[in-house]
Amino acid sequence: MIRVFSEIKKCLLILPFNKVLKIQNFIWKMSKKIIIPLVSIVFLFIIVFASWFLWYIKPYKPLRIYILDKTVPTIDRREHKSFSWILNHNNYIKKDGNRYNVKEDYYGFFPINLKANEFDFKSIRIHEIEDIASAYDMCYYTDTYGVYYNEWYRQNAQGEQPVTNKVYGGLNQNDYLLLKEMKDQKKLIITEFNFYNAPTNALIREKLEDLFGLNWSGWTGKYFSSLDTLKNEDFPAWIVRIYKEQNNNLWPFKNDGIVLVHKFGTLAILESETHLTSGKPLIHSNHETTKKYGVPKSIEYLNWFDITFSTEQNNILANFQFNVNEKGDSLLRSYNLQPVFPAIIEHIIDYRFYYFGGDFADNNVTMSSAYFEGYHQFASIISSVGKNNSMEFYWKYYNPLMIKILDDYYASIKK
């Protein structure tokens, strides 16, 4: 190698000075094209490895969690995947020392072969309830809506409402009895949207409402970025069909807005400019909530929610708010509704219970990103980019909220 450089040096010495300069400039430019990308790749590799290593050395936190998800029409387990992300990212592990597997470690519906429509389900028997309640530290009912004929056998046929021909779903008596036993044993209970809505029968719902001091109004809703069916091809056709049946075959909406659906089929539409000064629903947290859980005071919420109220035995940590004008307020009042209602309900005095009035756990995260320390801070920053970004809610609100709830509970049972 030394000999080669020596020969190159001799060649350069016999060349004219201006040609030497040209050759040196060419070598310098080529080295910049090679060295700078190479250094960047090495630097990026170091950052990624350091992030993984910092995650890997975090202490394990054994916590036995009963997860219930009855709404799994596809293989991605979306309704509880983001919760599994939090468990893995924060090194919560099972009793046997293994990490939580998003595809296996839950009760509910299990898709096996989508093409062949093969499925299984995992549920509890009545004689197992006391043992299961004793074996687990906490439970999280992420979604109980279920899987329906149109979603499973016809792969979500466009334009149809999957509310009949249930394949599997809804809370049953054993699900209720497990919650009651967990409450009696003072275990942490977390529930959220569609906890007791259809297809759960009225008797089970009333027992759950009495058990936790809740009162569902019968209304659910969701924000849509466009109510114009020509511009928004993904807008549910069943909403348009039912609304037309109830309103002289009219569908006059063109802007964004909020669709409210009652359990008996009545529809109410709040449209931007017509009924709303701003179409997107907000979650407003009180000062104590923002301070304790590290969540923003106000954030947009774009997923499904329900209008559920609470008795005085619980605390309201945050509220949903519709930004209605006079016409919108009048429309809500005609249905005995108000523009502000609970988003997070808490009870921590004699037992630990949380109810989230929205589909909080439904977030399309990438599980592999859970294994890198600091990723959630990075994702929180970039989630602010773009409009109608539902992931901003996950990274800035749901993620810190759940981490704080889990960490506080884990600390309390390890004392």
Image (cartoon, rainbow, N blue to C red):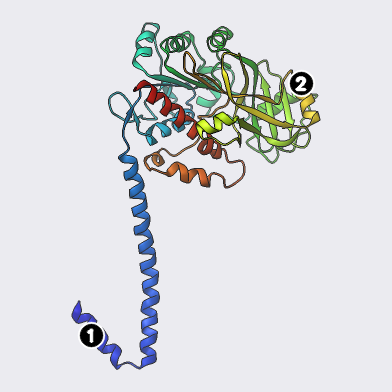
Find numbered disc 1 in the image and state the secondary structure of the residue it sits on: helix
Location of residue 142 with respect to 235 vertically, above or below:
above
Q: How many marks?
A: 2
* Residue 234, position as x, y percentages in the image: 62, 36
* Residue 20, position as x, y percentages in the image: 35, 88
Please identify the quadrant where the N terminus is shown: bottom left
Which residue occupies 47% across, 38% down? 365
Marks 2/1: CA distance? 91 Å
Mark 2: give few (<14), some (14-19) or many (20+) Cα within 10 Å: few
159 relative position to 249: left or right = left
Badge number at residue 243? none
Q: Which residue is more in the foreground, 37 or 183?
A: 183
Please identify the quadrant where the C terminus is shown: top left
Which residue occupies 71% across, 19% down? 266
293 relative position to 232: left or right = left
Q: Amino acid at mark 1?
A: Glu
**Closer to the N terminus: mark 2 or mark 1?**
1
* Residue 253, position as x, y percentages in the image: 75, 34
Mark 1: give few (<14), some (14-19) or many (20+) Cα within 10 Å: few
Residue at the spot of label 2:
333
Image-quadrant location for residue 55:
top left
Residue at the spot of label 1:
7
Q: Is residue 77 visible?
A: no
101 relative position to 400: left or right = left
Q: Is residue 46 visible?
A: yes
